[in-house]
Amino acid sequence: MRFEYRPYRRSFRQPLQTSHGIWTVREGIILRLIDDAGCVGFGEISPLAWFGSETFEDAIEFCQQLPNEIDGETIATIPTHLSACQFGFESAQEMLATEFTQSSALTHSALLPTGHAALNGWKDLWEQGYRTFKWKIGVADIEDEIQIFNHLVQILPAEAFLRLDANAGLTVSQAERWLQRCDSISNPILEFLEQPLAVSQFEQMQTLSQIYSTPLAIDESVATLNQLRECYQQGWRGIFVIKPAIVGSPSQLRKFCQETAIDAVFSSVFETAIGQQAGLRLAAELSLKHRAVGYGTSHWFD
């Protein structure tokens, strides 16, 4: 296969604030594979180093050292520490072999702006057809955020679902404060609280999941396939938020999900339509609980 690549940079319409910091530019690499018959397969490498993948620089260096022509063995032997590269190259190879179709059965979750802006930010998204929303927490004073949350759950329509995402930014006491508030909500609007604690506090998250009734999801804890396997082996049976673009090999991810039947939510890392298409294909195959996928991110870019 002939191999070509091109880096890209996309500025967010407004900076994305998480507990990890402020994100202003998404960098990635578009791949193109062309086989002997002239068929073309596109893939995308969209690293997220602060989340657990290789760096953008690592990915560029890997692409630069490859020859102009590669084969399936080259792709199969990409090391696991280059998980975004694994996904990009294997997705491009799969596109050569099979036609991509997007399932109409998938529903999507939209990411709300942080802070007070969420109180109005959901309205346009609702008009666009979104019924599930994600809101980042752990980025401001906890009492201020809980007040906003109290207002948000009152004004969202009864048909809405809300996910809270702490991006591993809470202390144990803060997580308990949030879970106490979430457990006290009488309506079923809250779907789950995502990754309240740091990756190193897996056992504490296990304990919290057993004490409180609000479902917990792990995200940063399962950034890569190796982490996914490890958390499953350690007994996590809650929700797994999987970011296909950085998790690693699509074929290995399929195998793991089919063998374990985990409750998975598939989510974006703000990749382009090329990476999204590959991720959504996996979501359509592997979402056993039919939860909304976290790919409602296009409104964050011009």
Image (spheres, helix red, strand yellow):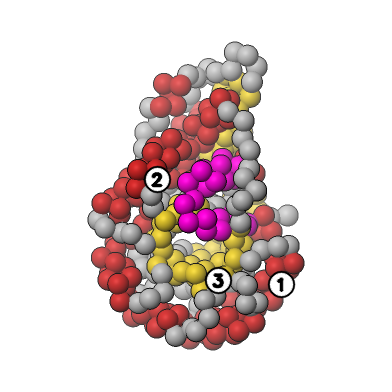
User: Looking at this view, is 100 or 23 the one in front?
Assistant: 100
Mark 2 or 1 closer to N-term? 1
Q: Give, as a three-letter code, the residue at label 3.
A: Leu
Query: Does the magenta-highlighted stretch encompass residue 266?
Result: no
Residue, disc 2: 257
Residue 144 badge:
none
Q: Give the answer, above or below, for where 187 lies relative to 218.
A: below
Point out the stretch of residues depicted in magenta.
275-297
> Quarter holding the C terminus?
bottom right
Nearest to the eye among marks 2 and 1: give it.
2
Q: Which residue is drawn at 59% across and 66% down?
A: 132
The kind of residue on which mark 1 rests is Lys
Viewer-proximal residue, 98 or 229? 98
Left or right, 302 with respect to 62, comes to: right
Residue at left 41%, top 60%?
Answer: 239
Residue at 40 percent across and 30 percent down: it is 78
